[in-house]
Image (cartoon, helix red, strand yellow):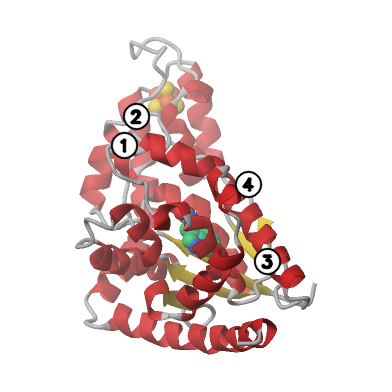
Amino acid sequence: MSNKRIVSGMRPTGKLHLGHYHGVLSNWLKLQEEYECFFFAADWHSLTTEYDNTSAIKGNTRDMVLDWLAFGIDPEKSVIFEQSLVPQHAELNLILSMITPVSWLERNPTYKEMQENLASKDLQTFGFLGYPVLMCADIIVYKAARVPVGHDQLPHLEITREIARRFNFIYQQEVFPEPEALLTETPKVLGLDGRKMSKSYGNAIFLSETAEETRKKLMSMVTDTQRPRRSDPGEPDRCVAFTLHSLYVPEEKRSEIVSSCRGAQIGCVECKKVLAEYVVETLAPLRARRDELAGQPGLVEDILAEGSRKAAEQAAKTMKDVRDAIKL
Ligand code: TRP
Ligand code: SF4
């Protein structure tokens, strides 16, 4: 495929943790070497659920983008922008909303699921139902060929493809390519309590915290629950902390740990101290970079303004094709 363009967005939920890093971000890092990437903060998407509580969105966007930059997402290589600074997303959303059957949106599994999960919130809104239309606009306004997403976003991407196809069919022009999902298998990063690492579970390790905080958290991480005493043999395959050893501790040291754990020659406290040192050491340069970037006033704002200008330039070209196709 000659089209090497990729679009992906993240809702600004605030500071990023190791789950984000080993999932979406490490994927983005590789992609930016090979493709023409557009990465954006999906702040309008945050409005679909936070419309009555918008005061944190701006700060969350800044925190999230700082983490992107610290992790190595590079404005020299990728277009890094903010959705709400590129009005073409909204314009295309409007046009696509005219051709999108409501039944496609109502049968979207994520729609019902999220309404149930966030039952305390009134999500009986037009915008919440239309979330996949806006997501479609985000992607096809750049005529992107591929979209790196997690499994949870696949239903949305399928709707995107259907809307793009329907537009091309109704207006009898191949304006939009049908974007493909780029699913990359990433390790499921467990949090301190053994559930999936997530900010809302309070079990996450953040890039933006200090080495001391990280050490303290790691010392509280669940291990092998079937090893009640130091003198009992343990099993790394059952150990929650060991999932992080697999990501941070070098192979040689790790196999040493495996055998001393099984032989009850090492205790979990000592073992997690080893882990903590590797994690802290790996994160140190990224943290230093984050601090340095955070100390430059206006830096994130400038990067987002410049990226949004570049994004809008491309989006404007597409909108010209769209207007031609619909003869307006
Ligand atoms: N819906 C995505 C999420 O919740 C965020 C998103 C919005 C997105 N627009 C996008 C992802 C376009 C990829 C492409 O994670
Ligand atoms: Fe896990 Fe290490 Fe304890 Fe073994 S010794 S159970 S690997 S923390």
Would you name the residue on which mark 1 appears? 201
Which label sits in the foreground, 4 or 3?
Answer: 3
- Is residue 48 visible in the rendered image? The answer is yes
Left or right: residue 24 compared with residue 190: right
* C-beta proximity under 8 Å, tags 2 and 1: yes
Would you name the residue on which mark 3 appears? 164
Which label sits in the foreground, 2 or 1?
Answer: 1
Q: Where is residue 129 in the image (x, y as percent from the top left)?
A: 46, 52
- Disc 3 C-beta below 8 A from ligand 1: no
| Mark 4–mark 3 distance (CA, rounded to whole Å) | 26 Å
Q: What element carries label 2?
A: loop
Q: How many marks?
A: 4
| Mark 1–mark 4 distance (CA, rounded to whole Å) | 23 Å
| Mark 4–mark 2 distance (CA, rounded to whole Å) | 23 Å
Q: Residue at 27% x, 63% y: name it.
A: 57
| Quadrant in which the C terminus is drawn | bottom right
Would you name the residue on which mark 2 appears? 193
| Mark 3–mark 2 distance (CA, rounded to whole Å) | 42 Å
